[in-house]
Image (cartoon, rainbow, N blue to C red):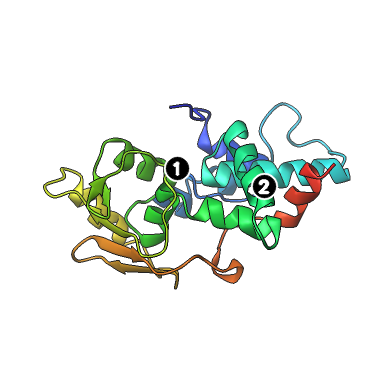
């Protein structure tokens, strides 16, 4: 499985805002953005020309890093979104939000997307009674998500639920039984990603 193994805090600093790639650590004073609020590298504190292309590229990179998706897969998602009816940018965000690793974070069953992917890859979650070990699995309306019986990471999952303030309206979660249901597709106003999707569409439209 291809994945980005670079330092998470440097990714947040590069985008100039918290992407919550390390879960609870991002809420503390140890957060890289809090300690050094400038881009990484020798020229991080220098003046940078903000061209139109640069702004669009940074927005695309921010979306990739926020959802933990590599470049090739992100292009595939964009192509799929552009073929669907409706607004391409919103379609793209719905596809990214519907990834199983992201859904577990939204439900409060994982502290970060990297932790969520690890839980899934190790086979600790089921969808509609069947074990799913693919983090990019696309959940659909009516899907029932549940932790595998006897999983050794149940304590970690319950710790993550304590950090969750609210579950999006398109999802339904039972933190006691560690089960959830997908009620419908998310609407744009329910997607909390710090992304301006129109800039991504403009970038790929060139």
Looking at the picture, how far across and down is residue 83, in whole percent?
Answer: 67, 50
Q: Residues within 10 Å of mark 1 (few under 14, many from 20)?
A: some
Q: Residue at 50% of width from left, 50% of height from top? A: 20
Task: Identify the image quadrant of the C terminus.
Answer: top right
Q: Is residue 91 above or below residue 176?
A: above
Front position in the image: 38 or 103: 103
| Residue drawn at point x = 56 percent, y = 47 percent | 66
Quarter of the figure with residue 74: top right
Question: Of marks 1 and 2, which one's residue comes earlier in the chain?
Answer: 2
Report the quarter where the N terminus lies.
top left
Q: Is the residue marked by circle 2 packed among few (<14), some (14-19), or many (20+) residues within 10 Å?
A: some
Q: Position of residue 70 (x, y in %)?
A: 57, 34
Q: Residue 164, located in which quarter of the rendered image?
A: bottom left
Which percent across, then down, holds residue 163? 35, 61
Q: Residue furthest left?
A: 150
* Mark 1 residue element: loop
x 30%, y 43%: residue: 132
| Element type at mark 2 | loop
Disc 1 to disc 2, C-alpha distance:
26 Å
Label 1 with label 2: CB-CB less than 8 Å:
no
Q: Left or right? Give the position of 174 relative to 90.
A: left
* Res 196 seen here: no
- Disc number for residue 16: 2
Residue shown at the point (81%, 45%) measured from the top left: 205
- The answer to whether residue 67 is left or right of residue 200 is left
Quadrant of residue 184 within the rendered picture: bottom left
> Residue 114's spot in the image, x, y percent?
41, 40
Left or right, residue 74 beside residue 179: right
Is residue 183 placed above or below 11 in the rendered structure?
A: below
> In the rendered image, which residue does mark 1 sit on?
136
In front of the other: 133 or 43 = 133
């Amino acid at each position: 499985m291809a994945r980005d193994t670079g330092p998470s805090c440097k990714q947040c600093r590069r985008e100039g805002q918290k992407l919550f790639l390390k879960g609870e650590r991002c809420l503390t004073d140890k957060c890289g953005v809090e300690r050094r609020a400038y881009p990484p590298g020798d020229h991080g504190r220098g003046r940078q020309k903000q061209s139109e292309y640069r702004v669009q590229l940074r927005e695309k990179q921010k979306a990739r890093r926020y959802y933990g998706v590599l470049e090739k897969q992100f292009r595939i998602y964009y192509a799929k979104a552009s073929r669907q009816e409706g607004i391409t940018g919103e379609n793209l965000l719905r596809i990214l939000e519907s990834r199983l690793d992201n859904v577990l974070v939204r439900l409060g069953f994982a502290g970060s997307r990297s932790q969520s992917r690890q839980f899934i890859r190790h086979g600790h979650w089921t969808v509609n009674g069947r074990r799913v070990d693919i983090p990019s699995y696309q959940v659909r309306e009516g899907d029932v998500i549940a932790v595998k019986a006897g999983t050794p990471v149940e304590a970690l999952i319950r710790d993550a639920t304590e950090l969750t303030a609210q579950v999006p309206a398109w999802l339904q979660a039972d933190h006691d039984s560690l089960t959830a249901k997908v009620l419908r597709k998310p609407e744009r106003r329910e997607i909390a990603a710090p992304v301006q999707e129109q800039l991504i569409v403009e970038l790929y439209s060139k």
